[in-house]
Image: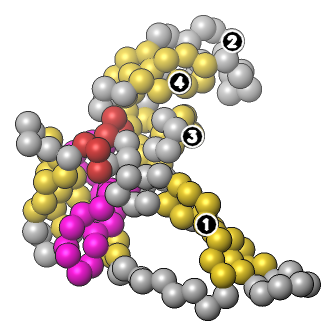
Amino acid sequence: ISFQHVKPGKGPAFVRTKLKNITTGKVIDNTFSAGHKINETRVERRKYQFLYKDDIGYNLMHTETYEQIILSADLINNTALLKEGELVEVVVHAEEEIPLFCELPAGVVLEITYTEPGIRGDTSSTSSLKAATVETGATVMVPLFVNTGEKIKVNTTDNSYMERVK
């Protein structure tokens, strides 16, 4: 995730790191001394299109080779905002061809299927929020001026409202 090279006035240089285990998601702090060897593993990011979900898992198609793969829900970072036809990135272990995880884009455009109507006088400067259900079935907190049928951009990391889309 991050690293910092430290060269103290006394003693050898070292590198302070934060490492993330891709398979488990666990983050650890580690310090490497000078000259420490690390085995590198090559991973690739590939563009896939989400086709549909069935009882086996989420079916994705590679955008260039049209090869289809099935991923389980635990490999996808936010399945609640995934809609059919959405482009995603799958990180694959290059030598073993094993999918490690799947990332949605930073923001996705979704249509609101239901929300309570706004009260007259609500403007974009109002800081209060209301619940809205989007086309994937997820619930997103939106400002009071947003209505049913409008399209909004949603942040995929925390399911928060970003902006209205025309």
Residue 21 percent coordinates (x, y) = 43, 60
Q: Nearer the viewer, mark 3 or mark 1?
A: 1
56 vs 143, left or right, is: left
Q: What distance separates the C-alpha of mark 3 from that of mark 4?
A: 10 Å
Front-most of 116 and 27? 27
Is 99 colored magenta in this rendering?
yes
Q: Nearer the viewer, mark 2 or mark 4?
A: 4
Q: Secondary structure at mark 2?
A: loop
User: Label 2 sits on what residue type?
Assistant: Gly
Residue 128 percent coordinates (x, y) = 67, 17
Q: Nearer the viewer, mark 2 or mark 1?
A: 1
Picture disc at residue 121: 2
User: Label 3 sits on what residue type?
Assistant: Met
Sequence-wise, the earlier of marks 3 and 2 is 2
Q: Which residues are magenta?
A: 82-103
Q: How is the image coloured?
A: secondary structure
User: Label 1 sits on what residue type?
Assistant: Asn
Q: Secondary structure at mark 4?
A: strand
Picture disc at residue 141: 4
Q: What distance separates the C-alpha of mark 3 from that of mark 1?
A: 35 Å
